[in-house]
Amino acid sequence: MSAADNPALPEAVRALAEADFGAVAQRFAEAGFAVGLPAPGILTVKGAPGAAHPAVLVSVGVHGDETGPIEMLAWLIEALSRTPRELAVDLMLCVGNIDAIAQGKRFIDADLNRMFRADRGSLAGTAEAARADALIAATVDFFAGAGPQRWHLDLHTAIRPSHYPMFAIVPEIIPDEPRKALIDWLGEAAIGAVIMNPKSVGTYSYYSAEHHGAAGSTVELGRVGTLGQNDLSQFADASAALDRLLRGRPAVEAKAAPHVFATARQVIKLSDAFAMSVGRETWNFTPMKKGEVIATDGDTVYAVEHDEELVVFPNPDVRVGLRAGLMVVRIG
């Protein structure tokens, strides 16, 4: 259900889902911040020039059907904008795939979270490619001249159930100190598992880490839900951790540190002959034993090489050339 189809939707949620930052932007501007609206669905709020503020980018709705983080962020930003001088960072808010959100769909032409790379092949003319270009341009401007503390939290929800309901993907290229700060924050947000990712597949958070030195992460906050009907209690820890970060308050010790996983391999769909041995109903982090066949693709066979590997994001329906699954092993 889109925002337009739900007359009972609270105004703060409706505004963010429709990429309308009008009221929020006005409150920050009246408090003396430099406010920008560089493209539809993008808001930047910056403090005094020359001040050493952390730069924090928060994105939601990169997949249009992942509505829980939209609701969570809407309430958080509505509250923060009512006490705007408590904002302690330079902030960029991004509503990713506006058109897909409006239609209650995951995407229009193709997955937006595979477009943050130079080589888009046959997808170069898609609606999502154009949207990614707008997001990239705004991201370049936002991080230009920013200090060393740079964050990008790209908030998602997963399609299928998971043995870790909350988990995150963290690029390995992030240096040790900001990576530790990011993983500590993820623990504070009640993220149960962190997957270290050695290679980009065109995601927004990997782009920010690779090109702008941000401590970026794709954060999966539970399951896909209907706009206006999400159980916001499942986002309580993540919302509190994000609110604390934006207000510059001291970190809160995590109740439990996330389990850390290394990427064993990316399972790439090479042709239309691709077939997975696990079903679409398979939970994320389902274990597989050494020698088990993960997928076949013509003469290519993907098999488990470690004593145990866990499958994440299994999806045989992706386009040829894209990742159809991720195999991980626990390292911490």
Image (cartoon, helix red, strand yellow):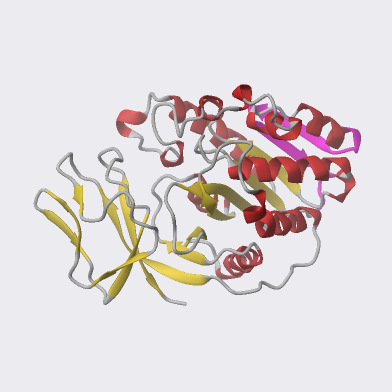
In the figure, residue 140 lies in which quadrant?
A: top right
Q: How far across and down, in percent of the image, does residue 267 sit?
A: 27, 54
- The answer to whether residue 144 is seen in the rendering is no
In reply to whether residue 146 is colored magenta, the answer given is no
Which of 119 and 265 lies nearest the eye of the viewer? 265
In the shown orientation, is residue 77 left or right of residue 3? Answer: right
Which of 296 and 206 lies nearest the eye of the viewer? 296
Which of 178 and 15 lies nearest the eye of the viewer? 15
In reply to whether residue 34 is colored magenta, the answer given is yes
Q: How far across and down, in percent of the image, does residue 243 sit?
A: 75, 54
* Depicted 256 relative to depicted 245: above or below: below
Q: How many marks?
A: 0
* Residue drawn at (51%, 60%) of the image: 167
Q: Which residues are magenta?
A: 30-51
* Depicted 163 relative to depicted 209: above or below: below
Q: How far across and down, in percent of the image, does residue 276 sit?
A: 22, 52
- The answer to whether residue 317 is seen in the rendering is yes
Q: How far across and down, in percent of the image, does residue 104 sit?
A: 51, 29
Task: Return the residue found at the far left.
Answer: 299
Which of 322 and 15 lies nearest the eye of the viewer? 15
* Depicted 97 relative to depicted 282: above or below: above
* Residue drawn at (50%, 28%) of the image: 100
In the shown orientation, is residue 139 left or right of residue 169? Answer: right
* Residue drawn at (27%, 42%) of the image: 321
Give the quadrant of the N terminus: top right
